[in-house]
Image: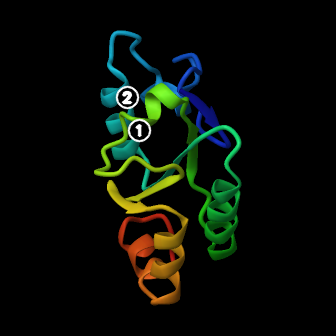
Amino acid sequence: MQAIEEVSPTMSSNNSSSSSLSMDLDDSTETRIQRLISEHPVIIFTRSSCCMCHVMKKLLATIGVHPAVIELDDNEIVALPLPNVVAPAAFIGGTCIGGLESLVALHVSGHLIPKLVQVGALWV
């Protein structure tokens, strides 16, 4: 599991801003993923060469949100709490929104911004 952007689960616990992200190597991948989902109002799980993740980040940045982005390898992708494993997968407020199409649909329908405000990821 590799964090990109502003989240790094392998950072030392000496840094106060990352202490909650320190990973216990005894934790299962599922446990670490669940912890990351619960710790971040907006988080995207992706694969290393996923252009759709870039589009997701760009859409959210345009709105004013900068999500945590975690890169998973193929073995870790299957640990995502999703009925059909897809990547990238966006979670807002601990709830899986889905992939890029779902995120765009949420935005076009006018429901994305209120949801981001509700979880404290955006102030209007």
Q: Secondary structure at mark 2?
A: helix
Location of residue 98 in the rendering, given as x and y in whole percent from the top left corner: 42, 61
Location of residue 56 in the rendering, given as x and y in whole percent from the top left corner: 62, 63
Work out whether residue 2 can be spotted. Answer: yes
Query: Residue under circle 2?
Result: 32
**In contact (CB < 8 Å): disc 2 and disc 1:** yes
Residue 64, placed above or below residue 8: below
Residue type of the residue flagged with mark 2: Arg
Residue 123, placed above or below residue 81: below
State left or right for residue 75 relative to residue 63: left
| Coloring scheme used | rainbow
Location of residue 35 in the rendering, given as x and y in whole percent from the top left corner: 34, 35
Residue 29, placed above or below residue 66: above
Q: Quadrant of the rendered structure where residue 31 is?
A: top left
Q: Residue 53: which disc?
A: none
Of residues 76 and 92, the one nearer the viewer is 76
State left or right for residue 67 relative to residue 19: right
